[in-house]
Amino acid sequence: MTVTPQTRTATELPAQYQPGEVETRRYERWVADGYFGVDPGSDHPAYSIVIPPPNVTGSLHMGHAVDHTLQDSLIRRRRMQGYEALWMPGMDHAGIATQNVVERQIAEQDGKSRHDLGREAFVKRVWQWKEEYGGRILGQMRRLGDSVDWSRQRFTMDAGLSRAVVTIFKRLYDDGLIYRAERIINWCPRCLTALSDIEVEHADDDGELVSIRYGEGDAAIVVATTRAETMLGDTAVAVHPDDERYAHLVGKDVELPFTGRRIPIVPDTHVDPSFGTGAVKVTPAHDPNDFEIGQRHDLPSITVLDEHGVVTAHGPFQGLDRFEARPAIVAALREQGRIVAEKRPYVHAVGHCSRCNTTVEPRLSKQWFVKVEPLARAAGDAVRDGRVTIHPPEQEKRYFAWVDNMHDWCISRQLWWGHRIPIWYGPDGSTVCVGPDDEAPTGEGWTQDSDVLDTWFSSALWPFSTLGWPERTPELAKFYPTSVLVTGYDILFFWVVRMMMFGLYAMDGVQPFQQVVLHGLVRDQFGKKMSKSRGNVVDPLDWMDRFGADATRFTLARGANPGSDLAVSEEWAQGSRNFCNKLWNATRFALLNGATVAGPLPPAGELSAVDRWVLSRLHRTVADVDRLFEEYEFAKACDTLYHFAWDDVCDWYLELSKPVLTAGGAAADASRRVLGEVLDVLLRLLHPVIPFVTDELWTALTGGESVMVAAWPTVDNTRLDAAAEAEIAVLQRIVTEVRRFRSDQGLKPGQRVATRLAFPTGTGIEGHEPLIRSLVRLGEPADGFEPTASLTVADVEVALDTRGSIDVAAERARLEKDLAAASKERAGCAAKLGNEAFLAKAPEQVVAKIRGRLAAAEGEIARLTDALAGLAGRG
RNA sequence: GGGCGCGUAGCUCAGCGGGAGAGCAUCCGCCUUACAAGCGGAGGGUCGCAGGUUCGAACCCUGCCGCGCCCACCA
């Protein structure tokens, strides 16, 4: 017998599945055989997914693991269905994150800052870092089994994608959708850059609310503030125009403490008279609201904090950090008797940098913005008119709430790592946007804008930039729009919305993807967010080491109910490992018993009820799983497969097959073929979720090349067999009842109990007598047989001779419990049927069903009553 | 402050108008010749609370209580 290196024979399969070696070997083989690659010239229908590009600094965490598992499952299924299925891989340059990492490295290794190196050298250093340390996640993706087309891997900073960035920037600029303006923006005093609104995370912090008296005597006015340190930059006090308390002061001015400046008291409807004192200090340079008030009243803006958050205003506070200046100023005001109230702690929402958690400083600054209104409207419309669907649909509300209320997007960042803004400034103050094919202006005094673009700007182009845009490539023609976008709901706004805006804009109104599938976040076993400080972070790499990649994937897919978070724990990973092992051993059993896929599957007429039953269950499973995949119901698809494989196949079919296989003959031949069929189809159904073990087993079972390139199963309706299912259901009930009886009676598992079985005529069940006897270890009635206990299940009477071992009290307890249940059932049904309104209004089917249940309950009661009577004379 | 979602067995979750379910955990019994990462059996829930609609409610409606998340320029 020849053994190819790919497949193993039954005797080579150990009793326990060892994932490690199999996974490495299989993955290398898949790549070598080119299974992941696609041909844009193919005439197969296209299916495409772009991977959410992980940060170049990133390492695989549970969020990636679930995200990739779902995408890989979709891709693998489509590939099996014959689609030209592209899963596009790549990475994001992750501006701030990467710059921070490299800056830290330079500080540690060389004791230098990026400014010591200078821009050009620093950027070069980042590229070096990327070559050396970046992309660790790519190897981890291989371990997980991601079937991405590695030959197409992209990076947001590579030449092609950079060209795409400049191209769209230029178009937006020329269309007036990118502009530069001086506004209050979110500024991180640690990262020293502007941030967009969504890069700011609001959290309730303990602050203080102090009330400060400006001015003296009748002209005094008291303002409440949480930011006393900005008072040095106040240029007005605002009150509500209808507030009578301050009517006499409007139009007057007061002296600002420490500065000697007199500032006006202005009326503005923004002020809420019921909050605090109803008077607000106005600092246009350091607060977005105040900035707007300043605009309305033509107030000057005085910047009193520098980019580090240090006071620049001349005087005693100059040089203090903002958090040192605050208590210092309050103390000084207190000395002057100007503090009239203090509330401390005062809990209020404060913005933090999403990268470094530093408190964000609103700062007046000249920045570049995308005018989002027309883009966001198009993005909303694409979902509104159904060109793009969002799963689960509840998430649409969040989507609309966002796109319909979006503020302009601040896209400039004061970083060095990223796409530099293609704007040049001339010596005469002129501004030129330099497109991808334009020559940058040369000559004295021309300089390029020093800022780079928000990382999400280039990510927003991902679905088409990775396919070659702005060139009209065959890839773009074949795979755009992409089929589905899979990601966590937490980056709906960061990424999905922006891809929609730019995709529709760049691709002439064609949406970047047809469906958006949002999954939840991975949480710990108690549903708590994973965090380092909580110490509950689970590492998928650790799981893969200990339980295997398939077990990790299965655990995550099985938890992925649409839109809701998944709680995972080690026990579940163990359960998934056990499941893989179960499949392993089922296949091992099949191979040891000569299961085969050779030759045609015998027609139903030549098969036993057991074989027909399992095929019927198989095809029902095919139908269910196929539908669940279409609906992105990963958890339910996995659950369906789990129960079919474990319950139907392993617990019942294999056990029912054993006597048949042992007996040999034509029935055994048929069973071997059916067994081969069942496992063949089952392994194909499972392959998208657990690719490694299924490939190992499927190749061993079938001798085929790889389950990756096997056909996705389709339903054969002719194999659906309600009669066989009903027949086997009866068999199962008999077996279960007898087992329960034996267990209740404490009969030794090995003990063969002499039993007589009496079957009603014409049901076909009697043919299963040997099977039943074998499964529950019943002996033939011999001479002197004396039935001492009997069970009736579906009109089959089971009489057992349990002399010497029956526990009458236990049996009576069991019968009485069943009787009580049956009586309750009868009463419930009778009550319904006695209800005129029910009979009149309930659908006929429901009424008939209740009648059937009543009859069954009555039969059950009669049977149990008899059994109890029979028991009465004993024990 | 606004919006969304959730409260079902010890834990995590399905079910979303007609017989309360799964996995894990628990208890009892088993090395039954594929698998002890296994096999067989069992216990366990007035489906958050209170009203309402309905012949019928875990499921629909209202209110309340308790959680969670997102958005937000009330100093």
Image (cartoon, coloured by chain):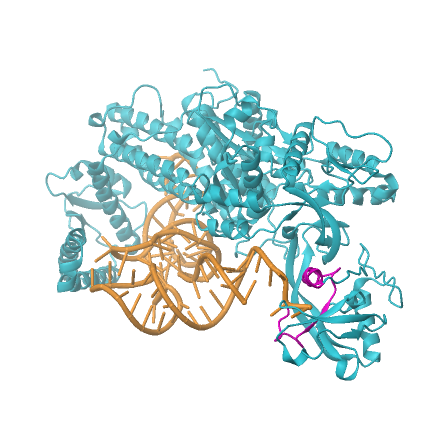
Chain colours: A cyan, B orange
Q: Quadrant of residue A427?
A: top right
* Residue found at x 81% / y 78%: A334
Judge left or right: residue A665 versus residue A275.
left
Q: Nearer the viewer, residue A757 or A165?
A: A165
Q: Quadrant of residue A822?
A: bottom left
User: Is residue A279 inside the magenta stretch?
Assistant: yes
* Residue found at x 37% / y 38%: A625
Q: Nearer the viewer, residue A828 or A9?
A: A828
The quarter of the picture where the C terminus of chain A appears is bottom left
Q: Position of residue A755 (x, y in %)?
A: 19, 45
Judge left or right: residue B9 versus residue A257.
left
Please say if A362 is above or below A574: below
Q: Residue furthest top?
A: A2
* Residue found at x 58% / y 51%: A406
Q: Position of residue A372 (x, y in %)?
A: 59, 46
Please say if A62 is above or below A721: below
Q: Residue furthest left?
A: A761
For the magenta stretch, what is the residue range? A271-297
Q: Position of residue A37 (x, y in %)?
A: 54, 23
Please say if A835 is above or below A74: below
Q: Nearer the viewer, residue A179 or A29?
A: A179
> Would residue A555 be seen by someone viewing this image from the given angle?
no
Query: Number of marks in the image?
Result: 0
Q: Nearer the viewer, residue A36 or A351?
A: A351
User: Is residue A275 inside the magenta stretch?
Assistant: yes
Q: Residue furthest bottom?
A: A217
